[in-house]
Amino acid sequence: MLMGMAMPLAKLLSMLTLKRRWAQFSLATMLAVVTVLCVSLSVVVNRAHRQRDAAASIKALGGYVRYDEPDETASEAFPREFLRRWLPRDYLDEVRAVNLDGTQVTDAGLAHVQGLSELGWLCLGDAHVTDAGLAHLERLTGLQVLYLDGTQVTDTGLAKLREALPRCKVIGP
């Protein structure tokens, strides 16, 4: 009688034991997942490095850089709040405004600004900028306000810039 009960009990125990098949995957699948994660991380890190280099160059020219301020009333997700303590600001916040008013920035110096894709406000008052320098700004599609007082920009260069950036309000010459 005991032998007769042992067989159904063994069958019940075998049904209750966890099978680890759900955690099995091939090495190729793991390699593909790791590759996708590394590529996506490199895109973020590359963008942050370009922004950090641009901000350092602007500050070296005597300019001022303003970052997008995090909303103090809203709580941030766990990883972002944790990373904010350990990573430089360029990894988490976008540069929104650059002030190069009265600096010695030239057309070549504006090449540093063209990498700031989220830039919304740019002041180039009394800078040594010409039409050639405005070509660096044509890809800043998010630019909303551009100050050009005291520059050597001509009407031709201004018309070309307005064509490239129709939503940008240009204040200046």
Image (cartoon, rainbow, N blue to C red):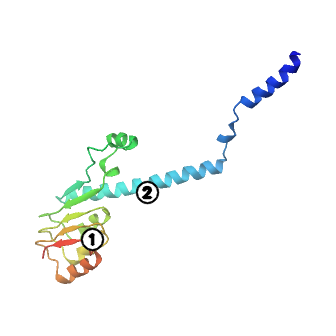
* Marks 1 and 2, the one that precedes in the sequence: 2
Query: Which image quadrant: the C terminus?
Result: bottom left
In the displayed structure, 55 sits above or below 109; it is above
Is 74 or 39 nearer to us in this picture?
A: 74
Q: Classify mark 2: helix, strand or loop.
A: helix
Q: Which residue is drawn at 51% across and 51% down?
A: 37
Quarter location, residue 20: top right
Quarter location, residue 159: bottom left
| Image location (x, y in percent) of residue 110 | 24, 68
| Image location (x, y in percent) of residue 47 | 37, 57
Question: Disc 1 marks which amino acid?
Answer: Leu
| Image location (x, y in percent) of residue 120 | 25, 63
In the displayed structure, 93 sits above or below 12; it is below
Question: Disc 2 marks which amino acid?
Answer: Val
| Image location (x, y in percent) of residue 131 | 21, 78
Is 60 or 137 nearer to us in this picture?
A: 137
| Image position of 59 (left or right of 22) | left
Query: Which image quadrant: the N terminus?
Result: top right
Residue at the spot of label 2: 43
Q: Residue at x 27, y 79 (%)?
A: 163
Q: Badge 2: few (under 14), some or many (20 or more) residues near its Cα, within 10 Å?
A: few
Q: Badge 1: few (under 14), some or many (20 or more) residues near its Cα, within 10 Å?
A: many
Residue at the spot of label 1: 137
The extreme bottom residue here reads 156
Distance from the alpha carbon under mark 1 to that under mark 2: 22 Å
Quarter location, residue 79: top left
Q: Classify mark 1: helix, strand or loop.
A: helix
In the displayed structure, 169 sits above or below 103; it is below
